[in-house]
Image (cartoon, helix red, strand yellow):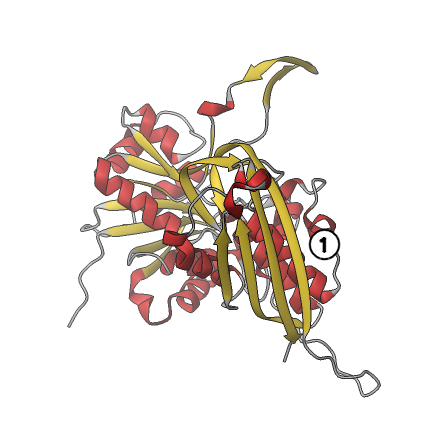
């Protein structure tokens, strides 16, 4: 039986030169680990809803782009194609639109440079288009204080409550996007701006910290740290065999942050946010401390301190994935983790399994158990002033 033509297409824009990255090749073909930025981006796209995938490649690199696309697609090679890009992003997207199949109803435009964007971001964008009929983009809240500056002087403060950092994929009804591109009379910074200038509404959905854009060498280092494979620890005859090790970690955060609560790797709409350099996720941070202490690698401040701006506002997945990579580099694997939450709010019972799954996934499938207590109204946690978490982790030598 022949599969139906997808109603969704994703244009993966990979035609940029990557000058600021300084790697000497077009950005999409720079390696993160054993694979290129483009390969990682395509794997994320193809892990999402079934869609036609049109890769927009630099001139002269079409064959290389098709090889990467086929490698990522596996038995879905019939869904992917490659077109030649242009000298601007807007013209490259227009070239991609020319390769979209006639039956496609929704078109998503995604920057290959946002190579680690999770599949659920694509799903949120598509769902918003289906529900509203508008375009939709993922966005992250702006957590820094924003100033207006002119000639080296602070001129005022911008209200960040109405600000969001736009990401991709940006999705639209196919007819709306095609008409907006046909009417465009100048270059726009992204597709949402172009569509909005044509008079159409655009919705915003929750983005993801992993969807950052790889633009500078620091961004590339961050991406490599997030996907770093665990390396076997060298074994020598003059080193005694290592047995299991146990680490203990604690973390405490007070309520009073901005935005919504993030705890145990989950968003808790309607609950007050915890304050902190990142998202204040005391559960994830306690787990990080337990893992690092068990491996003798210091603590969370050693690797994720306030002097590391790339972790500002980061969620549990970023911290836990990087910690797992650090353990692998030191020759350790995670056997299991247990964490207890002390808090009067939120109520964990209904979402305990969901939290365990989210934390386990971020640790590469290592089992995680979560328990919670209210402390019977005693102490700052009992007074609902904040959250405390206590974690124990067992490590074993990596095989």
Residue furthest top in the image: 155
Residue 26 visible from this viewpoint = no
Q: Is 66 in front, or is 72?
A: 72
* 267 left or right, relative to 99: right
* 39 left or right, relative to 332: left
Residue furthest left in the image: 1
Instruction: Classify 316 as above or below 90.
Output: below
Instruction: Classify 89 as above or below 256.
Output: below
Q: Which residue corresponds to mark 1?
A: 299
How many discs appear?
A: 1
Residue 354 visible from this viewpoint = yes
Mark 1 lies on a secondary structure that is loop
What's the residue at 52%, 41% (across, down)? 377
Q: Is 134 in front, or is 283?
A: 283
What's the residue at 49%, 59% (across, down)? 370
- Quadrant of the drawing holding the N terminus: bottom left
């Amino acid at each position: 039986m022949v599969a139906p033509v997808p109603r969704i297409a994703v244009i993966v824009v990979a035609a940029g030169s990557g000058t600021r990255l300084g790697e000497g090749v077009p950005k999409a073909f720079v390696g993160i680990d054993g694979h290129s930025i483009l390969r990682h981006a395509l794997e994320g796209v193809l892990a999402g809803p079934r869609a036609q995938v049109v890769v927009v490649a630099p001139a002269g690199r079409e064959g290389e782009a098709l090889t990467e696309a086929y490698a990522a697609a596996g038995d879905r090679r019939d869904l992917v194609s490659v077109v030649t890009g242009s000298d601007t992003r807007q013209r490259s997207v227009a070239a991609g639109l020319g390769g979209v199949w006639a039956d496609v109803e929704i078109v998503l435009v995604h920057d290959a440079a946002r190579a680690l964007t999770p599949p659920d971001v694509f799903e949120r964008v598509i769902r918003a288009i289906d529900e509203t009929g508008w375009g939709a983009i993922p966005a992250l809240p702006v957590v820094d204080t924003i100033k207006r500056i002119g000639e080296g002087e602070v001129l005022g403060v911008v209200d960040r409550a109405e600000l969001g950092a736009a990401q991709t994929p940006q999705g639209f009804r196919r007819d709306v996007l095609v008409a907006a591109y046909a009417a465009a009379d100048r270059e726009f910074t992204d597709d949402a701006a172009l569509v909005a200038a044509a008079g159409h509404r655009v919705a915003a959905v929750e983005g993801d910290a992993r969807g950052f854009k790889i633009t500078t060498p620091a961004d590339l280092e961050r991406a490599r740290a997030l996907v770093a494979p665990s390396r076997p620890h060298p074994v020598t005859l003059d080193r005694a065999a290592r047995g299991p090790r146990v680490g203990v970690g604690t973390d405490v955060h007070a309520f009073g942050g901005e935005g919504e609560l993030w705890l145990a790797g989950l968003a808790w709409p309607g609950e007050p946010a915890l304050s902190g350099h990142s998202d204040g996720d005391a559960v994830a941070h306690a787990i990080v401390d337990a893992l690092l202490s068990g491996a003798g690698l210091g603590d969370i401040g050693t690797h994720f301190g306030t002097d590391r701006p790339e972790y500002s506002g980061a969620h549990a997945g970023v911290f836990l994935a990087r910690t797992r990579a650090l353990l692998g580099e030191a020759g350790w694997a995670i056997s299991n983790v247990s964490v207890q939450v002390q808090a009067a709010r939120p109520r964990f019972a209904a979402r305990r399994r969901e939290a365990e799954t989210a934390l386990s996934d971020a640790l590469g499938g290592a089992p995680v158990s979560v328990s919670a207590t209210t402390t019977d109204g005693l102490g700052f946690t009992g007074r609902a002033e904040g959250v405390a978490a206590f974690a124990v982790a067992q490590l074993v030598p990596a095989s």
